[in-house]
Each structure stands twice: as structure tokens, then as C-alpha cells.
Image: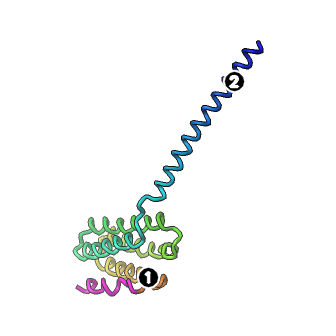
Amino acid sequence: MRQVFLFLLTLGLLSCNQQTGNTKELQNRIDSLEVKLANTYKPGFGDFMGTIQTHHAKLWFAGQHENWKLADFEVHELMEAIEAIEEYHPDRKETQLIGMIYPAIDSVDIAIDQKDLKKFKESYTHLTNTCNKCHHATEMEYVDRGQYLNTYLYL
């Protein structure tokens, strides 16, 4: 009986030892994936801003031509880009201030829903000014959208 007990105990210890080998292999895989994840491409803040600038300009032209479906698409693309900034760059000063843009975007969105060109122009101007305020607050005033977009506002 004692030999059977020792055999079962030895077998149990060996199976525990096997589990440890498995655990080490799994930990190595986790470590490897964490390294890969840390080195995965993450769009830079400027990449997002370039995307926002493109959608911002397209939004203006869509609204000007009362292409409300395209305007709706573009305003939602702006929202998605801002949400991506908040996800991928949460600790940046610029991200901490970017929330100031939401009321202006909401105003544009309402004007689009109402298909109101006058309200759209006013809301869009407010959106551009809000972008500029954020740029000034983060000392990025040299990227002032007003200098670029005012050319289009009065076409």
C-alpha cells in the first residue's frame, strides 16, 4: 500500500511539474505578444490631425453644396478621429483639451440634420474657431485652421 501511495505521489508531482513547463511556455508567449504589441504601429497625433483637417475641409464643401448625406458622413468621421485621439494619445496636453470641440461638432451635426445652410455656416465657423482656440491653448497656433480655411469660408 505504501508503494502505491508513493507511486501516486510521484505521479502527482510529475504532473505538477509538467504544468509548470506549460505555464512557462504560456508566459513566454504572453511576454512575446506584449513586446509585439508595444512595438505595433500607432498613428501619431499629427496623423490624426491631418485626417481631421481633410474631413473638416470636405465637411465645408459638402455643406456649401447642401450635400447633407456627405456632410453627415464627414462630421461623423471628425468625431471618430477625435475619439481615436482620445484612445491612442490620452496623456497628451492636446488630448486633455480636445473635448472643447464636442459642442461645436454637435452644433454642426444639428444643422446638418435640419438641412439648414445658414445654421450650418454659423456652426462650421464656430467649429473652426474652436479648433483654433485649442491650437492656441496648446501653443500650436502656427497650425491655425483659420488661415487655411477662411479662404473657403467666403467662396
Determine the secondary structure under disc 2. Answer: helix
Question: Mark 2 = which residue?
Answer: 10
Tell me, yes or no, if residue 110 can be seen here: no
- Which residue appears at 24% of the width and 77% of the height? 64
Residue depicted at x 30% and y 84%: 148
Say how the picture is coloured. rainbow
How many dots with numbers?
2
Report the front residue among 82 and 5: 5
Disc 2 marks a residue whose amino acid type is Thr
Q: Which kind of residue does numbered mark 1 sit on? A: His
Mark 1–mark 2 distance (CA, rounded to whole Å): 69 Å
Residue 131 occupies quadrant: bottom left
Residue 57 spot, x, y in % from top left = 29, 76
Q: What stretch is highlighted in magenta?
A: 142-155
Q: Quadrant of the N terminus?
A: top right
Q: Picture coordinates of residue 40 (x, y %)?
A: 43, 58
142 sits left or right of 155 in the view:
right
**What's the mark number on residue 135?**
1
3 is higher (above) or lower (below) than 81 = above
Residue at 54% from the left image edge and 40% from the top image edge: 25
| Mark earlier in primary sequence (1, 2) | 2
Q: Does the segment drawn in magenta span residue 15?
A: no
Q: How crowded is mark 2: few (under 14 residues within 10 Å), some or many (20 or more)?
A: few
Residue 66 position by quadrant = bottom left
- Occupied quadrant, residue 145: bottom left
